[in-house]
Image (spheres, rainbow, N blue to C red):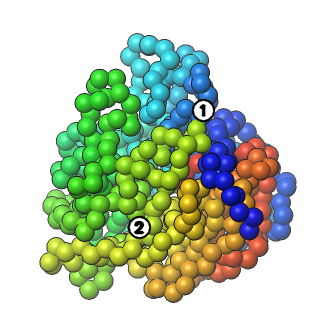
Amino acid sequence: MTETTDSRNANELFASVLRPNPVESDYAISKVEGEIPRELNGTLYRNGPNQKVAPAGGAAGLHLFDGDGLIHAFRFEDGRASYRGRFARTDSFLREQQEGVYLGGLNLPSEREIESPPPSASANTNVVPHAGRLFALVENAPPFEMDPSTLESKGFWDYDGRMLGSATTAHPKIDGRTGQMWIHGYQPVEPYIQLYCVEPDGSVSLAEAHDAPWPSMMHDFAITENYVIFPVGSMHFDLGPLAEGGRFADAVKGRDDRPQQFGIRSREPGSSVQWFEAPSVGFMFHPGNAYERDGRIFMDACTYEDPQGLLDSLVEIRAGGDSGGFAAHPYLYEFDLASGACKETKLSDISAEFPRIDDRLVGHENRWGYAATAEPREGADGLFQRITKYDRTGGPSVNREPVAGRWVGEPIFVPRAADAEEDDGFVLNLVHDANEDRSAIEVLDARAIDAEPLARLWLDERVPLGFHGNWMPA
Ligand SMILES: [Fe+2]
């Protein structure tokens, strides 16, 4: 590979792949290298921030999490593909279009004082199909429903009137066997944690609230066959600075004196939470998967050892600032339910994020996972440069060769058929070429992850790297 030698330059390039491109479009994808496998029939949904009304100083002033959710639907059918993009038209999105000026976010204040502003809800983090519905998700608002076919905005869903807090996260876990969707919410005021279960028919069968050792950002969580796991990281909310007009960044701080805590409870209604203390300080955006074996629970995750460094990088990254805080490493956590002990093992020094598995095994023992990774290096131009396939049984990982100036997004596994074995299928991945300033969807053979893509679909419009997505079979 041709190394990007200057880390400042790499940070600027990385910022360039995050630039908004707030365009709604529909087209057949015609620029295809290779051949789209005919077994791929369905829709790849993706989501990411695409701020439509830019702040006066430009989008570089935004926090990594700021920006309107533009939902991308890539439809695959009989060897052909098409694209449709639509904004999640939440109340705050519509109000901002109406006012025509930036109405504030995590980094920057509103540029106009308006009466009764709607609660900020960008719906920009994930997009999840469940029970015939499609939800655009962000962790500071309820799920926002959109039409799975047209992407028409439908509105917020309040869990059939059973919401216990102000929001749920962008990371529901759909049990690969039962089809139940488990989702949690967190907030900086009590009750700090809320948990819901949505049945395969869309009905809500559980809505319960829990306390936590302290109020923390809790971006994601995990389930096993019988339990759910709440990761409370070494970050602490303090709303005082916000009340005095401060930024989000002033209201959450990394805490070196507070090792991670994990709350584990049974999936049975009315269960209480057992808390486990990890040996070290840390924070995770994303667990890979969790499962039970012999009275213990195993969970892999990408863990940031310097939570405050991460928070600082989130503020600066859009402006080409220091990305050194983006250094999450693969960890394995082991919880002994009888003794209450938590063991943690660092699995590798590589930077890793966006771990995904075969979704049919969510909550159950899996072998293979796929993640966006990078070798550790000075200046941390960091994550997202290549796809790695990893083996939970300890076998060697397989890395795709990175291409200079090309960044990759979250790898999403699609089985070749409903009854295909684990890892028999495709990995779909958004790549962004910063040198050519264009984006593509790559279709990889999961069993030959380091080979040339089966197909590379160049898009007419640049799609910023964004965050998360999911596959819905036709
Ligand atoms: Fe996430």
**Residue under the point 62% across and 53% down:** 7
Looking at the image, residue 428 lies above or below residue 461: below
**Residue under the point 26% across and 86% down:** 294
Residue 354 visible in the displayed image: yes
At numbered mark 1, what does the secondary structure look like: helix, strand or loop?
helix
At numbered mark 2, what does the secondary structure look like: helix, strand or loop?
strand
Q: Please identify the quarter of the rendering in which residue 381 is found.
A: bottom right
Q: Amino acid at mark 1?
A: Ala
**Residue under the point 38% across and 56% down:** 306
Q: Is residue 413 left or right of residue 243?
A: right
Q: Is residue 343 left or right of residue 98?
A: left
Count the numbered circles shown.
2
Pointer 1 or 2: first along the chain? 1
**What number is the disc on residue 229?**
none
Q: Which residue is mark 2?
A: 301
Mark 1 neighbour class, 10 Å CA radius: few under 14, some 14 to 19, many 20 or more:
many
Q: Nearer the viewer, residue 4 or 215?
A: 4
**Residue under the point 71% across and 63% down:** 3
Q: In x, y percent, where is residue 70?
A: 60, 40
Q: Quadrant of the C terminus?
A: bottom right
Q: Nearer the viewer, residue 247 or 197?
A: 247
Q: In x, y percent, where is residue 102?
A: 54, 22
Mark 2 neighbour class, 10 Å CA radius: few under 14, some 14 to 19, many 20 or more:
many
Q: Is residue 206 left or right of residue 200?
A: left
Q: In x, y percent, where is residue 105?
A: 46, 30
Q: Which residue is mark 1?
A: 59
